[in-house]
Amino acid sequence: SAVISQKPSRDICQRGTSLTIQCQVDSQVTMMFWYRQQPGQSLTLIATANQGSEATYESGFVIDKFPISRPNLTFSTLTVSNMSPEDSSIYLCSVEDPGYEQYFGPGTRLTVT
Amino acid sequence: ILNVEQSPQSLHVQEGDSTNFTCSFPSSNFYALHWYRWETAKSPEALFVMTLNGDEKKKGRISATLNTKEGYSYLYIKGSQPEDSATYLCAPNSGGSNYKLTFGKGTLLTVNP
């Protein structure tokens, strides 16, 4: 199974600022995913990030708010832009292995004040 | 958007008790069902991936069954231990996709010593 790390593990940010979350995988993977869990809600897919192409966003999520980079097969970033308190969530990245399992990072706990 | 329901929402049991939770999901366009265990401040841990109707999988004291025709899965924990305390999430693949997961809100299990 892949080992995934995320930075930062948590942060408290001011309204209107942006935060970039990093996701590092210990092996090369084709597909990386970004999820969000708002308080009391389900873990929800934000977008799928493939190396060398634009990220594919799910309904309700847009590139201007959540720009994603995928410069190589082991790394991705998610930026939460112009933050508001509603963006307070746990953000997780994940990768898929050929056996259809997805492995998750430990998450970034974001509080927007 | 898939409607994934998990019950109960939370559960308190005593050490040594056996317990089970339910995940219900739309039976149409089924591809696979994933179970995860998520402890606070850790990565969600993949428990099972189940694909066939009637599948039963087991890992130690934890087992799961799958009924794709009626759209439900049960997760069983035999002889619960305090270290089993976590949120248990189920996620079917969305819309026939082999990688998009739609998560339920989870069952929060607390095992009292």
Image (cartoon, coloured by chain):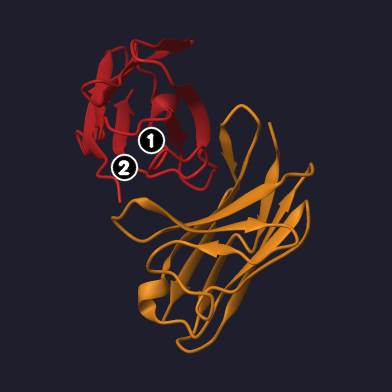
> Which residue is at a point 51% across and 37% down the rendered structure image?
B98
Residues marked 1 and 2 touching at CB (< 8 Å): no
Which residue is drawn at the image coordinates 79% and 44% (left, top)?
A28
**What residue sits 56% from the left and 32% below the top?**
A101
Which chain comes out orange in the rendered image? A
| Mark before the other along the chain sequence, 1 or 2 | 1
- Determine which of the numbered discs, if any, sits on residue B104 in the image: 2
State whether residue A56 is above or below residue A42.
Answer: below
Q: How many marks?
A: 2
User: Can you say which quadrant of the picture contains the C terminus of chain B?
Assistant: top left
Residue A52 visible to the viewer = yes
Image height of B39 relative to A39, above or below: above
Do discs 1 and 2 share a chain? yes
Chain letter, colour red: B
Residue found 21% across the figure and 39% down from its top: B9
Q: Secondary structure at mark 1?
A: strand
Tell me where residue A93 appears, x and y as whole percent.
58, 53
Amino acid marked by disc 1: Pro
Please provide percent x and percent y for residue A57.
50, 64
1 or 2: mark nearer the eye: 1
Classify residue B81 by image quadrant: top left
Q: Is residue A67 left or right of residue B88?
A: right
Position in image of residue B53 (x %, y %)? 34, 15
Name the secondary structure under disc 2: loop
Which chain is disc 1 placed on?
B
Q: Nearer the viewer, residue B86 or A24?
A: A24
Q: Which residue is mark 1?
A: B92
Nearest the viewer among A94 and A111 is A94
Please give left or right for residue B72 compared with residue A61 in the image.
Answer: left
Query: Residue B87 or A54: which is nearer the viewer?
Result: A54
